[in-house]
Amino acid sequence: MFALPITDIIPMKDLKDTVSLEKKCAEKGYVYVTKNGYGKLVVMDMDYFQQVMGDVMLSQAIKEGLDDIKAGRVVSGEQFEAEMKEKYGF
């Protein structure tokens, strides 16, 4: 597990100031929200969220590919091409 660098921390009560919250998220990407001094939420800018989720999905695909290689679930390029020609006729 890794920790994101802490950029901005706001108390839960400051969620009411949506203009300031939106500005902080746009500048930093995300804001930590605390309740009684403990981390409770992370609020993210939508563009930042989509970037992070894209990175997560790419990492998962790479891991699955490496797992397939380790488990021997691979075929040669020539074999793949032959199977596609047979199945789809091209």
Image (cartoon, grey):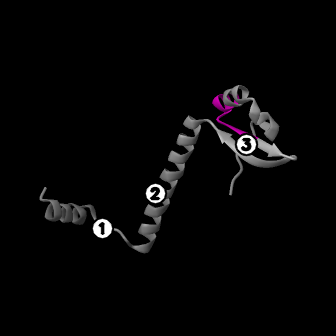
Residue at the image position 73 percent from the left and 46 percent from the top: 41
Q: Is residue 52 left or right of residue 90?
A: right
- The amino acid type of the residue labelled 3 equals Pro
Q: Quadrant of residue 20?
A: top right
Amino acid at dot 1? Val
| Left or right side of 37 for 55 | left
- Amino acid type at mark 2: Ala
- Asked whether the viewer can see residue 11, the reply is no
**What residue span does the magenta drawing correspond to?**
24-32
Along the line of sight, which residue is nearer the eye, 6 or 39?
39
Quickly name the residue at label 2: 61
Is 60 contained in the magenta span?
no
Is residue 89 visible in this depiction of the protein? yes
Q: Position of residue 37 (x, y in %)?
A: 87, 46
Query: Which mark is in front, 1 or 3?
Result: 3
Look at mark 3 in the image and give the residue it sits on.
5
Query: Farthest residue toward the left?
Result: 89
Disc 3 packing (10 Å; few <14; some 14–19; many ≥20) = few
Q: Earlier in the sequence, mark 2 or mark 1?
A: 2
Going from N to C along the chain, the mark reached first, 3 or 2, is 3
The answer to whether 23 appears left or right of 64 in the picture is right
